[in-house]
Structure formats: structure tokens, C-alpha cells
Image (cartoon, rainbow, N blue to C red):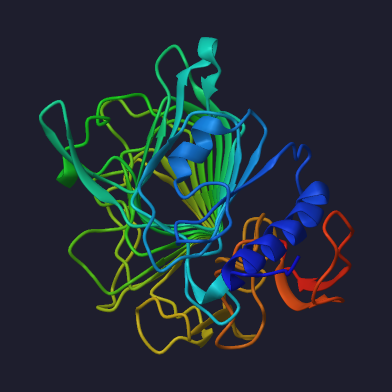
């Protein structure tokens, strides 16, 4: 029987086989690995992410191939591991493509029926975002973390993704790190139906790149070692105020670099060990009801090579040796995305300073020792693979 009638089928087979070996050690519970690819004759088990989720068992891992075609949006309502190929097309990305999705909702829907995404891990997706209406309100959403007052969404990890608007409601212990995001929280310009909801507790937003800002979050939330970037002065980083009515203290905003972005709008926030430099200059933190200490205002962070207030994957956002952000973080490390709890994955050399891949292995060498084997016999395969930085 001859192997490989379809090249892409072999590629996906290689991809899934190598992933299985790596994920056994990477995640505490592997269970079944399910493959998804929306290209014709791919050899994957499913072409739809939602269909794969519906068929999966709690604890399974779903691998979604890179593709030229955007996947339909989906609702994750089980504890699963979802891994895409990454959010930026590079020669190292699987098949050279990203894993692009219209939108995703991570939800505690009905725990009595095992419809609960608590404990899930999501990695390696580019989420476009869609416009929806709910309750007569206009809403733009890329990613939604959704619980209910009686069913809190808990212990979800969201890493190495790129998306625009992130909305949260009724959650606890959510980790969002090493992503490229626009906005997080409740954006009033979108008239979100979640605007008056309690947002939950224990949100860690660490080592992300923001091209927008933070809106109306409250409670025990930590924003640490993020980079807020862009010369758009239409709205501030806290563009509708971090606090909402009767905001209580508990938000920590530390070790962040605001590069070209104004501040303002925050209330009852611990603002410490941050740097701000706007394209217009003269910016200071609006302390008001906020606590403060050790912030650097109107100071150049001295990146290695960032010629403008913009996100560009060819720029080098590491800090120069004489940067004022070196060693001045609250934990004694540096401010910004390469310090703190989850240093942004970096290959170390331009244009790969910012790694945009997921932590799935990439096949570098693949050899089938025989072109044909008798039916029912074993196939001998030699594989070599590499894995991107596993921070």
C-alpha cells in the first residue's frame, strides 16, 4: 500500500504525531488528541472547531491547523486544551498559515450537564471578532469569558493569542498572558450587555501587548508587565475609567510601559513602577484616588529598536542595557513584557524577537524509510522537531 496520496494528509499526521509526544509532558492530562483542519482532503478528524468540541470528552486536546480560510466562531463549554498554529504568518508557522477564528466564547454554561469550560487552556489563535446584538445592544467581541452569577467560570489560561475585544463576566482565577490584545473589560462604545455585571476576582493580565486599553474592571485584578502601545490619543489606556460605580480598591497596575499612550481615567488603583511617554509629551499619571509610587513619567524606556509608537513585528521591543526600566520593576526585574511572571516568548533575533507561534512542535525533518509497505505491517518513520520558547 502506497503512502501519502495527499501531501497535506501526511503533513497533518506528522503534526499530530509530534504534538502528542510533546503534550504528554507539557500538560498534566493529555487524554485524546483531536485534529481539526478546514482544508479539503486534510486528513484531520474534523473541519469545524465547534463540531470537534461537541464530540470531545472533558480533558481532551484539540489541535487546529493553520489555514488560509478563517474558521467559524465557537463556544467552548467543556474543559479542553485548544491549540492553534499561531497568530502571525511566518515561515516557521504550520503550513505557513495562522489559525484564524471569527470569535470564541469560553463559558460555564451548565455544570450539571458537564457544560463548563473551567480549567481550559487556549493557545495559538488569531481571533478576528464579530459584531453581534444581544438584548437590543450592539456588541463587538473577539473573546468572551462568560460565567453566570451562580456558575462562575474559573481557572482558564489564555496565552499566545491575538484578538481585539475581550469581555469578562462572573469569573475567578483567569490568566491572560503573552497575548496581543486591543481592549479588555467592558467597552462602553460597544454598549456591551455585560456593562453592569460584577466582573469577578483574581484576574491576572501579564506580559501582554495592548494596542488599546482597559475599561471598567473592578475587584482583585492584577495588570503587570504589559506594554500599551500606539500614538492614538482618542482614548486613554483607562479609556472609560478602570472603576465603575462604587468601585472598591483591589486593582494593581504595575511594571507596565505606556509607549505613546495617555493615562487618565483610573480610580482606586495601585499605580506603581510604571513608565509613561506619549507622542505629545507632558503626560503624567492622574493619581486622584489612586495610590502611587516609583512611576517614571515622560521618560523614554529605550527599547533596542522601536522607531515609532506602533506595533510592528520587525521592531525589537527588548530594553537596551541603559534603559531606565531595567531592574526597576516592583519585583526587581525589568518593567515591560520581558520581565515579571511570564516573560514574552522571544527567539532573540530580529525579526523574531516576538514569537508568534504556539508551543506545538514544528517538524524540521521527516523521513519514511520505505516508499511502500505490505498491508498490516509497520511503518518506520524518522522525525525531528523543534519547539518554540516555552516560557
**Residue 88 percent location from the top left of the image:** 47, 72
Q: Residue at x 49, y 21 (%)?
A: 152
**Residue 31 percent location from the top left of the image:** 74, 36
- Give above or below for 37 relative to 120: below
332 and 180: which one is in front? 180
Image-quadrant location for residue 340: bottom right
Q: Residue at x 27, y 30 (%)?
A: 194
Image-quadrant location for residue 192: top left
Left or right of 179 in this view: 119: right
- Give above or below for 317 relative to 186: below
Q: Is residue 302 visible?
A: yes
Q: Residue at x 57, y 53 (%)?
A: 44
Q: Is residue 360 visible?
A: no
Left or right of 27 in this view: 8: left
- Give above or below for 220 relative to 17: above
237 and 372: which one is in front? 372
Image-quadrant location for residue 264: bottom left
The quarter of the image holding the C terminus is bottom right
How many numbered badges does the structure rendering display?
0
Left or right of 54 in this view: 355: right
22 and 235: which one is in front? 22
**Residue 102 percent location from the top left of the image:** 33, 52
337 and 350: which one is in front? 350
**Residue 7 percent location from the top left of the image:** 60, 73
Q: Residue at x 76, y 65 (%)?
A: 1
What is the residue that sits farthest to the left in this orientation? 136
Amino acid at each position: 500500500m502506497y503512502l501519502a496520496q495527499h501531501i497535506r494528509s501526511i503533513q497533518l499526521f506528522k503534526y499530530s504525531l509530534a504534538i502528542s509526544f510533546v503534550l504528554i509532558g507539557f500538560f498534566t492530562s493529555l487524554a485524546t488528541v483531536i485534529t481539526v483542519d478546514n482544508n479539503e482532503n486534510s486528513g484531520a478528524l474534523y473541519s469545524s472547531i465547534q463540531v470537534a468540541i461537541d464530540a470531545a470528552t472533558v480533558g481532551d486536546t484539540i489541535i487546529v491547523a493553520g489555514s488560509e480560510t478563517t474558521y467559524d466562531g465557537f463556544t467552548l463549554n467543556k474543559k479542553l486544551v485548544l491549540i492553534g498554529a499561531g497568530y502571525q504568518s511566518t515561515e516557521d508557522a504550520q503550513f505557513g498559515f495562522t489559525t484564524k477564528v471569527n470569535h470564541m466564547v469560553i463559558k460555564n454554561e451548565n455544570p450539571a450537564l458537564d457544560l463548563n469550560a473551567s480549567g481550559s487552556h487556549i493557545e495559538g489563535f488569531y481571533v478576528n471578532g464579530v459584531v453581534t446584538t444581544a438584548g437590543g445592544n450592539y456588541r463587538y467581541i473577539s473573546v468572551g469569558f462568560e460565567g453566570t452569577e451562580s456558575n462562575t467560570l474559573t481557572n482558564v489560561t489564555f496565552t499566545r493569542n491575538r484578538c481585539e475585544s475581550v469581555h469578562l463576566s462572573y469569573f475567578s482565577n483567569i490568566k491572560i498572558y503573552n497575548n496581543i490584545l486591543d481592549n479588555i473589560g467592558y467597552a462602553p462604545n460597544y454598549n456591551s450587555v455585560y456593562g453592569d455585571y460584577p466582573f469577578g476576582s483574581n484576574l491576572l493580565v501579564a506580559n501582554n501587548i495592548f494596542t488599546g486599553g482597559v475599561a471598567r474592571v473592578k475587584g482583585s485584578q492584577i495588570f503587570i508587565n504589559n506594554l500599551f502601545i500606539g500614538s492614538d490619543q482618542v482614548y486613554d489606556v483607562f479609556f472609560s475609567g478602570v472603576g465603575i460605580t462604587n468601585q472598591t480598591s483591589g486593582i494593581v497596575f504595575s511594571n507596565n510601559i505606556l509607549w505613546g499612550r495617555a493615562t487618565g481615567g483610573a480610580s482606586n488603583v495601585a499605580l506603581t513602577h510604571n513608565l509613561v511617554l506619549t507622542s505629545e509629551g507632558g503626560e503624567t499619571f492622574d493619581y486622584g484616588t489612586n495610590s502611587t509610587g516609583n512611576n517614571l513619567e515622560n521618560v523614554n524606556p529605550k527599547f533596542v529598536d522601536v522607531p515609532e509608537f506602533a506595533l510592528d513585528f520587525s521592531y525589537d521591543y527588548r530594553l537596551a542595557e541603559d534603559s531606565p526600566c531595567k531592574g526597576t520593576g516592583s519585583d526587581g526585574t525589568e518593567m515591560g513584557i520581558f520581565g515579571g511572571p511570564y516573560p514574552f516568548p522571544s527567539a532573540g533575533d530580529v525579526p523574531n524577537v516576538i514569537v508568534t507561534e504556539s508551543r506545538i512542535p514544528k517538524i524540521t525533518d521527516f523521513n519514511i524509510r520505505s516508499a511502500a509497505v505490505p498491508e498490516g505491517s509497520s511503518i518506520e518513520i524518522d522525525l525531528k522537531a523543534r519547539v518554540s520558547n516555552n516560557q
